[in-house]
Amino acid sequence: MTSSPQKVSLKSKLKKIFCVSLVVILIVSSVSFYFWYKEIMKINLQATQVVAKAQKFDTLKKEILTQQEQCKSFIAKGSGDFNQFTYCTRFIKWAESLTF
């Protein structure tokens, strides 16, 4: 089996084209992966921040409801000075105006 110079040359050219194409595909996929990973990490950071914010909101909500209950029990007792009573009535109105 003998090969002519044209067949060898054609095979050589196809092999070079294939190798160059493979290298280009690898480079493009690597760059795409880098930007995809970078975007995913940015979204992950944002999600972490939102979760932390939600946890702080839940804590604040619990504290407001606790203070509101304390003020309601204080008003129900009917004892204390005028400033505390005024504070509690304003706080209760403010807390009830919030939408959780």
Image: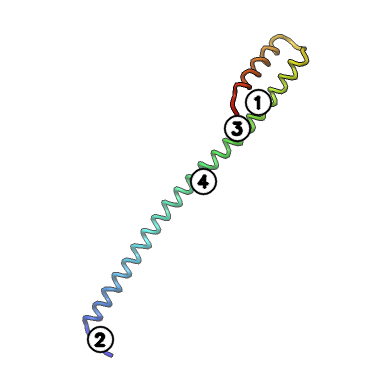
Q: Distance between the residues labelled 1 and 3?
A: 10 Å
Q: Distance between the residues labelled 2 and 1?
A: 88 Å
Residue under label 3, please give it.
57
Task: Tell me if residue 97 comes above or below residue 2 in the rendering.
Answer: above
Sequence-wise first label, 4 or 1: 4
As shown in the figure, which amino acid type bears the numbered disc 2?
Ser
Q: In percent of the image, x 39 and y 59: which residue is there? A: 29
Q: How crowded is mark 1: few (under 14 residues within 10 Å), some or many (20 or more)?
A: some
Q: How far apart are marks 3 and 4 (CA)?
A: 20 Å
Residue under label 2, please give it.
3
Are circles 3 and 4 on residues that touch, CB within 8 Å? no
Residue 30: mark in rendering:
none
Q: Is mark 1 on a helix, strand or loop?
A: helix
Residue under label 4, please give it.
44
Q: Is mark 3 on a helix, strand or loop?
A: helix
- The quarter holding residue 69 reads top right
Q: Residues within 10 Å of mark 2 (few under 14, many from 20)?
A: few
Q: How far apart are marks 4 and 1 (CA)?
A: 30 Å
Q: In this view, does 17 lie to the left or right of 58?
A: left
Residue under label 1, please give it.
64
Q: Distance between the residues labelled 2 and 4?
A: 58 Å
Sequence-wise first label, 2 or 4: 2
Q: Is mark 4 on a helix, strand or loop?
A: helix
Q: How crowded is mark 4: few (under 14 residues within 10 Å), some or many (20 or more)?
A: few
Observer-side mark, 2 or 1, equals: 1
Q: Is residue 51 left or right of residue 78?
A: left
Sequence-wise first label, 2 or 1: 2
Q: In percent of the image, x 60 and y 29: which residue is there? A: 100
- The quarter holding residue 6 reads bottom left
Residue 76 percent location from the top left of the image? 76, 16
Please name whichever residue, 86 or 22, is drawn nearer the observer in this view of the structure: 86
